[in-house]
Amino acid sequence: MKRNREVALAVLFLVPSAVVLGTFVLYPLGRAVWLGRQRCDAQAVRCRTTGWRQYVDVATSSEFTHALGVTLKFVALTVPLGVVLGVGLAVLADRHLRGMAVFRTVFSSTIATSVAVASLMWLFLLQPSRGALANVAWVRDWFPVVKAPGLLNDPGTALSAVALSSVWANLGFTFIVVTAGLQSIPRELLESSVIDGAGPWRRFVHVTLPLLAPTLVFVGIVLVSRAFQAYGEIDLLTSGGPQPQASTTTLTYLVYGQTSIARSDAGLQSAVAVLLFLVLLVVSLVQLRGLERRIHRGA
């Protein structure tokens, strides 16, 4: 009797979470999977079923494969650079020096900046006609592309420019998380390595980095997820262009973008969104399986 009451109480406590999960996660996911089998108008009112074949057609289409390639390039540009910069700044700030609190505040300030604000700041810097960076004489002389046609307008540099703004916007998050990881490392281990004669680089590689591995795995998974789902900076800075190369049309922009070919068909949008979910799920599983074996978990 007592056990039954405990089970009933546990189920009662789980009901609110189950309702929220079902309403905001499971139902939208199921609805998206169902819509992915349809060809619909923009309002998803008039639909006709095309079957599961539509997922295959979308996955093998040139537009999807191109957007997937751009997305993978964006991930490759943003994640490694973001992790390296975040770890570097956190290591520099993890010193007991006067005034270091000011630097920690500056380094972490981007976490309070929205994607829209960060993108508009970089647009002010990179816009070729009135941008602050584009109108600096020595920058314009050394890198003519910043002025004509502009980093955001050149098909070869647009994705890198957007990636730079994304790295800057996410740097505060990476810095704070890595700083917390560094502060959790026992100081006794570092002091012992100093006594053993290890220099700063050897201490970092053989002591700090292995103990920081769980934090880096978490940061890597979050940054990869954000990169795969990046939309605001792409929409504000390049609108998926430059065209016709669609140099910054990622999978997310293919779903929501104003210039996307799938914009007028809710069924195609849902199919791309579901495929993006599957790609991100596979990537996350690969990250967890591949990296967790190399993690050192301290007692």
Image: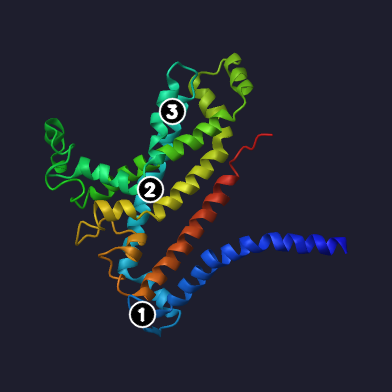
Residue 137 percent location from the top left of the image = 11, 32
Say what amino acid the circle numbered 1 marks: Cys
Question: Dot 1, how many residues are within 10 Å of its Cα: few (below 14), some (14-19), or many (20+)?
Answer: many
Q: Is residue 262 left or right of residue 201?
A: left
- At numbered mark 1, what does the secondary structure look like: helix, strand or loop? strand
Question: Is label 2 in a helix, a strand or a loop?
Answer: helix
Q: Label 1 belongs to which residue? A: 40
Q: Residue at x 40, y 25 (%)?
A: 103
Q: Which residue is mark 2?
A: 76
Q: Identify the image quadrant of the C terminus.
A: top right
Question: Label 1, label 3: how many angstroms apart (C-alpha)?
Answer: 50 Å
Q: Residues within 10 Å of mark 3 (few under 14, many from 20)?
A: some
Q: Residue at the location (48% across, 45% down)? A: 220
Q: Determine contact: label 1, label 3, CB under 8 Å.
A: no
Relative to 101, say whether 15 is above or below: below
User: Which comes sooner in the sequence, label 1 or label 3?
Assistant: 1
Residue picked out by circle 3: 104
**Residue type at the position of mark 2:** Ala
Q: Secondary structure at mark 3?
A: helix
* Mark 1 or mark 2, earlier in chain: 1
- Camera-nearest label, 1 or 2: 1
